[in-house]
Image (tube, helix red, strand yellow):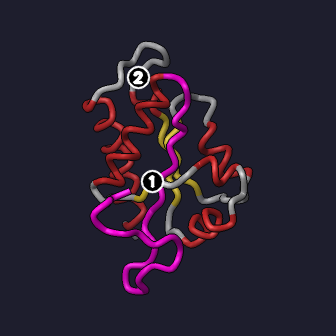
Amino acid sequence: MNATQPKCSCSCDEDSGPPALVYPCSGSADVGEIADHAARRLDAEDKAWMSCLAGIGGRVSGLMASAAAAPVLIAIDGCPHDCATKTLQLAGFTQVKSVRVTDLGFKKGKSPVSDPAAQAVVQRVETLLVEQKSP
């Protein structure tokens, strides 16, 4: 979360509406950590707001409401288990856009967490966001 500017949870400015929300798997493998770093970068750059995947799994009412109000939900999965995507879908969110770190050429257990790795994921998410805005 950007510490310099407070973010709303689900009652955003009517003109801009709620932002895209991004949910990284943040799993125990290196590719999960890459997903987490990418989500934090997207949040810091105000390209999408990082939200709490565990809260969705736990059906926390405020987090569920924020997800329901967002124009797009983006899951960043580290590996083919697709835990972030499946968690959102099991919570009833069907319009989830997904990025899988391993689909970008990273190998689970063999991909050091680095700025270039996180940036590759950020670029893929940015592409999804541009596609989402196109008619």
> Which of the two residues, 54 or 79, is positioned nearer the viewer here?
54
Q: Residue at x 44, y 31 (%)?
A: 33
**Residue drawn at (46%, 27%) of the image:** 31
Residue 2 position (above or below residue 24): below
Q: What is the count of numbered marks?
A: 2
Which mark is first along the chain, 2 or 1?
A: 1
Given the image, on which type of amino acid does mark 2 rest?
Phe
Q: Which image quarter: residue 66?
A: bottom right
- Across and down, in percent, residue 90 comes to 74, 50
Q: Residue at x 40, y 69 (%)?
A: 7
Few, some or many residues within 10 Å of mark 1 (<14, 14–19, 20+):
many
Q: What is the C-alpha distance between the residues marked 1 and 2? A: 22 Å
**Residue depth check, mark 1 versus mark 2: number of the one nearer the observer:** 1
Snapshot quadrant of residue 93: bottom right
In the rendered image, the quadrant that contains the C terminus is bottom left
Could you tell me the amino acid type at mark 1? Answer: Met
Residue 33 in the magenta stretch? The answer is: no
Q: Which residues are magenta?
A: 1-29
Q: Mark 1 sits on what residue?
A: 50
Q: Is residue 75 left or right of residue 46?
A: right
Question: Residue 106 bears which disc, if any?
Answer: 2
Check the image and report above or below for 112 versus 34. Answer: above
Residue at 47%, 53% (x, y): give it.
22
Q: Is residue 96 above or below residue 35?
A: below
Closer to the camera in the image, 59 or 35: 59
User: Label 2 crowding class (10 Å Cα cut-off): few <14, some 14-19, many 20+?
Assistant: some
State left or right for residue 84 relative to residue 48.
Answer: right
Quadrant of the drawing holding the N terminus: bottom left
Is residue 25 a member of the stretch shown in magenta? yes
